Amino acid sequence: MHDEYNFYTKEQKLRTEVVNRLTPKPTVEPVQLNSSTEDYDDSEVVGCGRVDTRNIYVPLVLEGQTIERGQWPWLVSIYSYSKSKLGFRCGATLISNKLVVTAAHCFFDVYNRKINSDDVLIILGQYNLKRPQDQGSEIVYPESVNIHPTYRKLTKIDSDIAVVVLAERVRFTHYIRPACLWKGPDTKDSIVGKRGYIAGWGRDEYGNFFSELPKQSEIPVVSDETCLRSHEVFVRITSSVTFCAGWRNGTEGPCNGDSGGPFVFKKDDRWTLRGVVSTSLLTDGSNTCNLNEYVVFTDVAQFTDWITSFDTDYTY
């Protein structure tokens, strides 16, 4: 069944480590890397979904182009250890000073075994994937990794969503800010035909397994009916808690390495999380995404109560 579609982490065996120096598994408390008090701002007052435009030179609309540092301050990278080696796994979204939202399948290895939360680390404010210790980035560790209870990696790919609770509340900076969590109309009809933005370090058009710098694309949401009619496999990998999006042009959209990343919309003048990159169909004869078909996203709006249950202090 799974040979027909792709979780974007299936090519794990082909990947090289993306950290310049492989480091032993840390045993110390989380530390902030290369930041100064000058980096801190009043984002907690400003609220979610706002970009500090003083630090960037272009707007948050580049359509398939490399983004500037600071344009996606809620974009998070997830790494995990395997045999004492650290490797990049997925993208994710910071939604508060305590919570990160990503895909559930990001926490399973190539043998479909759940990854221990002690082997997971999160990098906030990261820009260059090969330089996790750049100034402004911050390495943090999970207090817990929570996979939605109805998700089953092998038998039920529905509810492909996870919440990482951070061990310590983070302080927002120019480069570390949360996206808003969707509120208001949660029906899929409310976003069909609208365009949102995805970003990540996934496979690029040149065949590289990862992009060194994150890229973004603008893609449209399509109706369930349109998605289901486009390919018979979508009957098995879509549901009431997913939606489909994409151009089907073979080039623009999320690909291998973009799993768990955000799909955001400008809503009430704030960037708001509505989708999590989940899965796509495979290109024939390869283990890479097929962008001639639609991409499936987990519909975050169907899980807001579950997500916010992990932080009693969360406010919209």
Image (cartoon, helix red, strand yellow):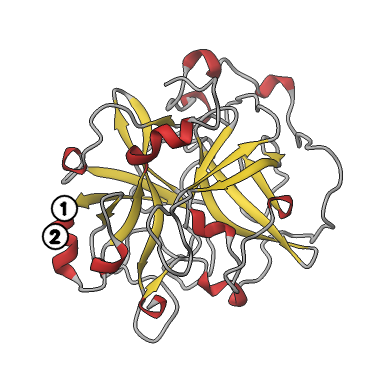
Q: Is residue 94 above or below residue 268?
A: below
Calculate the distance from the C-alpha at mark 1 to the C-alpha at mark 2.
5 Å
Q: Quadrant of the C terminus?
A: top left
x, y (%) of residue 9? 52, 66
List the residue tagged with mark 1: 223
Q: Is residue 249 visible?
A: no
Q: Is 277 or 310 nearer to us in this picture?
A: 310
* Residue drawn where x is 40% and y is 62% of the image: 157
Q: Is 279 or 32 nearer to us in this picture?
A: 279
Callout 1 touching callout 2 (CB < 8 Å): yes
Judged from the image, the secondary structure of the residue bearing numbered disc 2 is: helix
Q: Is 148 on the left or on the right of 141, as rendered?
A: left
Q: Is 301 on the left or on the right of 174, as rendered?
A: left
Q: Quadrant of the N terminus?
A: bottom left
* Residue drawn where x is 66% and y is 71% of the image: 16
Please rate how many residues cluster around mark 2, counting C-alpha atoms within 10 Å: few if below 14, some from 14 to 19, many from 20. few
Task: Say which mark, if any, is on residue 300.
Answer: none
List the residue tagged with mark 2: 226
x, y (%) of residue 140? 70, 39
x, y (%) of residue 53? 46, 26
